[in-house]
Image (tube, rainbow, N blue to C red):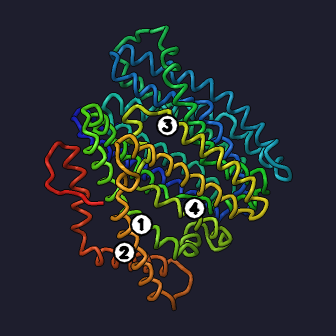
Amino acid sequence: MPNDNSQLSRKQAALLLIAGRVVGSLLTIMTAALLSRWWSGAEYGEYRKVWLAFQALSPFATLGVPAGLAFFLPQIDRGRQKSAVGQAAVLLLCSGGLISVATIGWSVFGGSEDSTGRLSAAAAFALYPVFALPLLVTDGWLVAIGKSRSAAFFTMQTAFLQSIAVILPAACGCGVATVMGWLTLTTVVRFLIAVSIYRSEYGDVAARWDPGFLGRLLAYTVPLGLAGIVGSVHLMLDKLVMACWLDAESFAIYANGATELPAIGIVSSSVAAVLAPEFVRLFQAGRLREMLELWRSSVRTTGMLVFPLTAGMLLYAPDAVAFLYSEKYLDSVPVFRIYLLLLPLRVTVHGSLLLAAGQSRAVFAASALGLVLAAMLLGTLVPVCGMTGAAAALVLAVYAVAGFLLVRTARLVGVSWWQSFPWRHLGLTLAASVAGAATAASVTQPMGLGNLRLLTGLGITAATFVAINAGPRRSRDELLAVVNVITGQRSSRTATG
């Protein structure tokens, strides 16, 4: 593992975490792209359904324990840290046993024609949750004790091992059940790596058993866990409904379309994580307008990345789907385009200021609202519109949640809804992005579907956007304004909405 003795700034820590998570996300996308080409639609859909079952059940099993552990560790000595990490890992290991049984049950009763195939895959996958759930605490506790380099390295290392465990057997012609077996075996190896890191970090200290720690941990994490469950189920409800509605082959089409570009969400969430302590400090000092301006500045900066990408990807969605999953999944394009409409929301984490103010109930209420609304819209739209109805239901519900949080944020800071967000700047950014996409469309119109058109179109969209905004200096100024506030330097730039 890399040396973590030197101190890292918040910005450096965030960049390391972003790097680790982006690498993991890219490996996940690469794995899906290869499996889409190598396996039949039925096999690939079977694989995605088993993964969906695990992802849907994980929040119920973890109940926010990884986040809670990261909260408590900096407050206790190394002896108690050793005991706390061990207790949390054992707790998640036991929860993994329960989720293993539930995964098999969901695979049997979650569909009809393809349940037998999914049962064999789930059986091979059964031990995966037992060893995978304890791993969820690893990067969190490493970051909490100042080991960001080790956390990033561990994240990239485990993502690489997991991808290899899937790609190599699939490349050799193995089916879903065999791949799931190798995936489980590799997860045991990842678990042993995490144990070795734990022993390396705490081998020189004796554990100081705290019998009341688990009680305090769960008292803190259960409310967070419930909010996480509501939020997670809300964001994957459309996939859960379609997994039960569709056979494996049709679900593969929907699953490939119902994909967000992960790097954007990683950037915005990492920026929010870095800014969170500053938000708390400004709120406690009563400097609400400065807190709002810092948030608005981060939104403007991220928007200059998100909006051109959204415009370009909407235009070249067929080329993007063909590039990612091959032309046999072009039926995923309508769903993919609808999901791209979520990208503009990823300019920020909309509940950031509310959480800084301690108003977690408002964030939970927003997630609950989204879940209820998504369920109602799914029940209305899926019977009429099928796959596109499911995607539209999810997107509409997410926009409703963002709107609710924005109204509550405006009320918190004491400004109007219009003043709470940089609408004018985002409108100009959107107009420049549309102009860039229109320019790209006129140039690439004679070109046929393919990677060349995709890369050329996105390049022209980006170049036109930069030209309209008078060069890249504007983007650098926005980023510098955020960095200056974080590092405590005064910025002479006054932002406008």
Q: Which residue is more in the foreground, 429 or 65? A: 429
Q: Which residue is more in the foreground, 24 or 374? A: 374
For mark 4, give the secondary structure: helix
For mark 2, give the secondary structure: helix
* Residue under label 3: 362
- Res 226 → quadrant: top right
* Residue under label 4: 339
Asked if one can make out residue 305 in the rendered structure from this viewpoint, the answer is yes
* Residue under label 1: 307
Give me the residue at 55% from left, 38% from top.
365
Q: Earlier in the sequence, mark 3 or mark 1?
A: 1
Q: Estimate how packed mark 1 is, as few (under 14), some (14 to 19) or many (20 or more) residues with alpha carbons within 10 Å.
A: many
Disc 1/disc 4 C-alpha distance (Å): 14 Å
Foreground mark, 4 or 2, reads 2
For mark 3, give the secondary structure: helix
Disc 3/disc 1 C-alpha distance (Å): 28 Å
Residue 244 in the figure: left or right of residue 494: right
Give amino acid for label 1: Phe
